[in-house]
Amino acid sequence: MTTETTFPVNKSDVASFSKDRQEPQWLTDLRLSSLENVDSLELPKPDKTKIQKWNFSNFDLKANVTETSVTASIKELIGSEENVQALVAQKNGVTLSKKLASSLTEKGVIFTDFETAVKEHSELVEKYFMSEAVSTNEHRLTALHAALVNGGTFVYVPKNVEVEIPLQAVYAQEGTFGLFNHVLIVAEANSSVTYIENYITEGEAVEKVANIVAEVYVADNATVHFGAVDNFSAETTTYVNRRGQVNGKDAKIYWALGQMNDGNTVSENTTYLHGEGSYGDTKTVSIGRGKQVQNFTTNVIHFGKNSDGQILKHGVMRDEATSIFNGVSKIEHGATKANGEQTERVLMLSEKARGDANPILLIDEDDVTAGHAASVGKIDPIQMFYLMSRGLSRREAERLIIHGFLEPVVGQLPIESVKEQLKEVIERKVN
Amino acid sequence: MSTPSLKVEDLHVSIEEKEILKGFGIEVKGGEIHAIMGPNGTGKSTLASALMGHPKYEVTSGSASINGEDLFEMEVDERARAGLFLAMQYPSEISGVTNADFVRSAINSTREEGDEISLMKFIRKMDEKMNTLEMDESFQHRYLNEGFSGGEKKRNEILQLMMLEPKIAILDEIDSGLDIDALKVVSQGINQMREERKDQFGCLIITHYQRLLNYIKPDFVHVMMQGKIVKSGGPELAERLEAEGYDWIKEELGIEDETVGQE
């Protein structure tokens, strides 16, 4: 336990916040019971990273949003607003723009902000919200999250509906506001959907906290593509936990995560492969710079027979940054014929940076296949020689190698403007 | 335009403190094709790598210049931008970087900002050169050399050569591992450069088989042993080597071991 256990909120704050938002009773109750647990629960313990002294509690909950339309930095991410067919854009949890093509609403697709969802689709949200993928009392940060959730979106795709256009969400954070963002995605049987999100910081450089949870539920034969670019500033301490509950037979989830935060970050991404023949594909890229400390843990947990889990993590480390890359493929007893593969690669650009790649296979079943590969290395001087021998400057050659190294994930992002934006972020961070 | 030239004098090169090149000299001018032949282990590839600036090789003495500029004062990329090109025996694989993106960046690296090659012009040129080299269109979008067969890598080297239009090209055993059809195609690429660029293109071909020279007619043939040129002549020298091997040269010059020990 740390000495700092007092959070800047009490029971009556939470109750009145919930009341102001006209939330259903179940959510008010859940908030209050979670808040009670905050003090007694411990912080999560990401393997090989000490976070006891990180700031998870110094924030306020006044949104102070004056804008009524999307901000300039959000606009950059969505391109021309008229062309966007599915969008939720928020700043400090306040929705600035929301849009869903009528062709989709007619089919019963829901894509709306969390605040609206709990009012208009209370039963659906209650059924899934922190019920299975993430529970409120896992540790202090999940309890805090449940108590204070103040932003996010809800996606619901009914049976047999294939959403062809990507659903885009942008979440901006400003000031000392503590962002507790919850993304809940439910894909019913035989449905498919692509969701992509961006997190950004606006305004002056002040310490802040972001606490993000995403839960994705995938039913029989459904497919979810989940893309994300996290790009919080150096002063932001981030806890982000994205989990996929792949329950359906032959259900599939594809994660493409660009982890570009400049501040200290704990990022967990877990896929539970319950369905027989279910598939989980995780691709992540990250860049560490400055003195930031980050922990990226990817878990794929196999329960279903013939389930297949793939993990690919690429990280670039510079300056004095420290990153831990944990990849865990766990195959439970009974998950016969499961296959778990993982690769972690770290490219070191500086002598003072630290990058650890830890591939872990935990296997409780005989009849499975699994494999892992990990490497931590510098840019190959022979590759540099080759590129420079064609006239590229050292800087340009390095740039190409780094972009190439990150391409396996960057190339997976399904929205062109977001992909370009990620490339620009990478450019800025490596130069 | 003046005729380009690569001039190498009394070059000594070591690798891990072992001397490989021991007083090598040559001059290659635009419009000329030189072939350097020699048995394995005589320093041929060391020459190619050292001239381009491979980090493993250390130039201990001697000089080399391109168009009068000191090669060893230049970084690798500056040598390339001065017009030197090396078609490598073992080109690197670069994951995540497509062939087309790479070649375009390379072309633009020799141009001023604002004067970059237009996309249309680039595509047309790339299509045309790939056609000459009988390369499938898909190679444009594949990652640079990744998963390419030996022969595909060699074609790709020549493709880059044709796209970048260097003033002086060194081909380091470009024929090794090529079947006869691929050899013809690759030679066609070089011959096309020669015809189009005339005295603005000079070439130094390193090989230990004469067969490549059936398709690319050299103006000068040099034999390399013990880290330097021991005999020079015209195309007839290559033919004699093909027919009689290298022993007669060793005998003539009183050389017992033609190698430099290792390469």
Image (cartoon, rainbow, N blue to C red):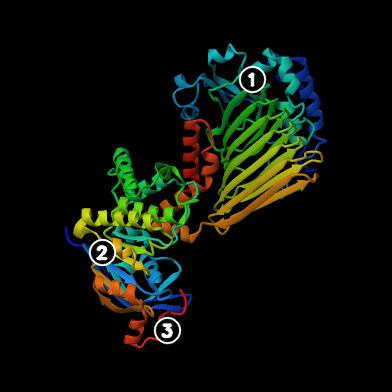
Mark linked to residue A243: none
Q: Chain of mark 2?
A: B
Q: CA distance from mark 1 to mark 2?
A: 68 Å
Q: Amino acid at mark 1?
A: Val
Residue B172: give x, y in percent of width and height. 38, 64
Q: Amino acid at mark 2?
A: Lys
Q: Residue at x 60, y 30 (%)?
A: A225
Q: CA distance from mark 3 to mark 2?
A: 29 Å
Q: Is residue A266 visible?
A: no
Looking at the image, which residue sits at the far top?
A: A106
Mark linked to residue B217: 2
Q: Secondary structure at mark 3?
A: loop
Number of residue marks:
3
Residue A320: give x, y in percent of width and height. 58, 54
Foreground pick, B1 / B195: B195
Residue at mark 1: A157
Q: Is residue A388 visible?
A: yes
Q: Amino acid at mark 3?
A: Asp
Foreground pick, B26 / A260: B26
